[in-house]
Amino acid sequence: MSTIAAADTEPYAADGGPIGVVLCHGLTGMPGSMRPWAQALAEEGLTVRAPRLPGHGTRWQDANEVSWQDWYATLESSVDEVRSACTHTFVCGLSMGGTLALRLAEERGDDLAGVIVVNASLFTTRKDAKLLPIIRRVLPSLPPVGNDIKKPGVTEPAYPKLPVRAAYQLSLLWPLTNADLDRIRQPLLVMTSREDHVVEPENSARVMAGAGSADKRQVWLEDSFHVATLDNDLPVIIEESLSFIRAHAPVPESR
């Protein structure tokens, strides 16, 4: 943790106009992985929150002491905070943050004006994942999944290990989210890295096929790995998300 800037571990907040956006980081990540995206949206006059999920931004061991329900509750609380001040609220997520955003969309319906996910996670083909129910009892951690970035010189603020019990919690969230994809009716933007070494791009195909949204679109990110929010395609993510938000809420042009 000594090499990670303190600001990367802290939640991000910016108060702007009546359109609100909540951005959720992924497993072992931190708000810093969403900060450039969050700041770009705030500069356009939006109200923005990027919470820190429980068990993150401290020690990797802490992630083994929380449940997916704890993560979900934190995201839901941030969304409710933004909704109390805004006329339209959008939820965005990277990786596991995308999973949580999709689950929130399934549960909260018209409370959300739209959903944006980047490399959202709904399953994995990794063989060791099938052993999580067993190894979580004997192994505290596995090699890290963070920092899958193509852009030279960029490092993701993330844990140096994958907490096994935290990974198991994510695996419990997957079947629930998969089972209810057809309940997602909000406008949906799915952004997918063509080359991703953490979450298989087929996850996005499942989102697109299963979501009940009449308005859904996939954008391929051609020059980024998994943590695309810190990678070469960040400008694409910003541009596409702003266009999406403006299409579904009366967002003023840049200040």
Image (cartoon, rainbow, N blue to C red):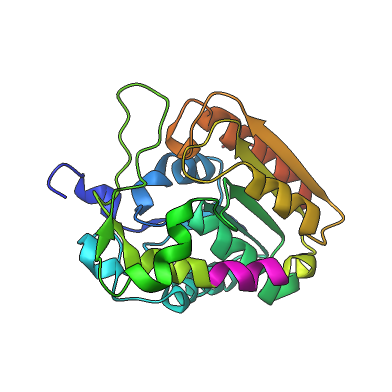
The residues colored magenta run 173-179
Who's the residue at 57% across and 36% down the image? 238
* The magenta stretch spans residue 175: yes
The foreground one among 129 and 62 is 129
Who's the residue at 47% across and 66% down the image? 170
Is 153 situated left or right of 235 in this image?
left
* The magenta stretch spans residue 215: no
The dominant secondary structure in magenta is helix
Answer whether residue 133 is visible to the viewer in this image: yes
Is 171 situated left or right of 178 in this image?
left
Q: Is residue 93 above or below residue 33?
A: below
The foreground one among 72 and 195 is 195
Q: Whole-percent x and y of residue 163? A: 30, 62
Q: Is residue 40 above or below residue 235?
A: below
Q: Whole-percent x and y of residue 149? A: 40, 32
Q: Whole-percent x and y of residue 115? A: 67, 56
Q: Quadrant of residue 214?
A: bottom right
The foreground one among 198 and 20 is 198
Who's the residue at 64% across and 41% down the image? 191
Is 95 situated left or right of 242 in this image?
left
Residue pushed farthest right? 214
Who's the residue at 77% across and 43% down the image? 217
State how many labels appear. Answer: 0
